[in-house]
Image (cartoon, grey):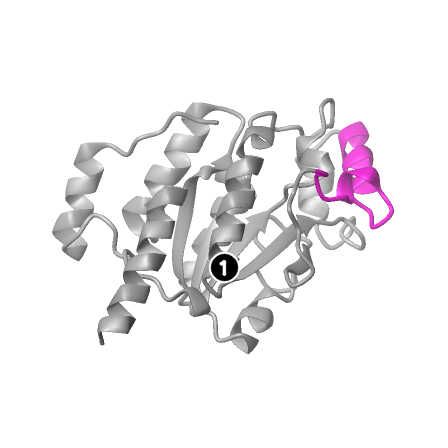
Amino acid sequence: MHKFSMSSDVIDRIKARSGRAHPFDSLDAQRTALLVIDLQNYFLKPGAQGETASARAIVPTVNELAAGLRSRGGQVIWIRNGTAGTRQSWSTFHECLMTPERQQRRYSEMQPDGDGFEFWHALDIRPGDGQLEKKRFSAFIQGSSPILDYLHDRTIDTVLIAGTATNVCCESTARDAMMLNFKTIMVSDALAARSDELHAASLTAFYSNFGDVQTSAEVVASLDRGAQTRKAG
């Protein structure tokens, strides 16, 4: 798991702008969804082409946060990357940014019957959870997944972002969620990248301009704070 703490200078800027360190420090669990991004074999299995080894270490934290949100009435949605039908529609990525060998391996391993498409075995996926497939880094970009309608149908206005990689699919999804008017929190200890530096840079950039960054413990405290506020009201 990454060692991370937000710079005090950045925190001071956010306090000056929003009046507090965490703009989303009081959450309504029933309008909150945890989006767990790409915790599948292609990114977690040792030796996989897309392996992000640190992602295996966040699985217990992700499972614990999922359980905590479920118990408070929130939604958990497991989202994985699939490649079916994307060779031509995303040819810039496949043909220009990857070698032919890597392109073919990525494309085949994340097909619906590919081993890389399978969710990592240690995830605590429950029957009531959502399971969605996305076709781009961001789950929200047009044509990637049905996530927008899925959330709107359930009156969700707040999303918690967990999974891998912090700086690629997770940040892409988080930024687009904010642009689509969701209150968006990246959960720092439930995210993983290929280095501490990439993880930290991504979280700092997101917190500076797009939304909130909280630890899983801070998220739970925000959920409970919101429950207490509604009870008092």
175 and 115: which one is in front?
Answer: 115
The answer to whether residue 165 is seen in the rendering is: no
Q: Position of residue 129 (x, y in %)?
A: 63, 60
User: Mark 1 Cα within 10 Å, few/some/many (few <14, many 20+)?
Assistant: few
Q: Indicate whether residue 115 is drawn in magenta.
A: yes
The quarter of the displayed image where residue 106 is located: top right
For the point 30% across and 31% down, which residue is it? 5
Question: In the rendered view, does 55 fall on the left or right side of 196?
Answer: right
Horizontal placement of 3 versus 156: left or right?
A: left
Horizontal relation, residue 206 to residue 232: left or right: right
The disc labelled 1 sits on which kind of residue?
A: Ser
Q: Say which quadrant the C terminus sits in.
A: bottom left
Identify the residue at horizontal 47%, vertical 70% (top origin): 156
**Which residue occupies the extreme right position in the image?**
113
| Towards the viewer: 10 or 44 | 44
User: Is residue 126 within the magenta segment?
Assistant: no
**Circle 1 SS class:** helix
Q: Where residue 207 sits: x, y (%)?
A: 32, 45
Closest to the observer, 198 or 94: 198
Give the total of numbered labels: 1
Residue 225 pos. (x, y %): 28, 59
Q: In the image shown, does 163 or 201 lie closer to the viewer?
A: 163
Residue designated by label 1: 71
Q: Which residues are magenta?
A: 100-121
Q: Which residue sits at x=82%, y=47%? A: 111
Q: Is residue 85 left or right of residue 190?
A: right
When the figure is inspected, residue 183 is found, relative to residue 186, above or below; the finding is below
Quadrant position of residue 228: bottom left
Is residue 12 at all visible to an observer of this figure?
A: yes
Residue shown at the point (21%, 48%) measured from the top left: 21
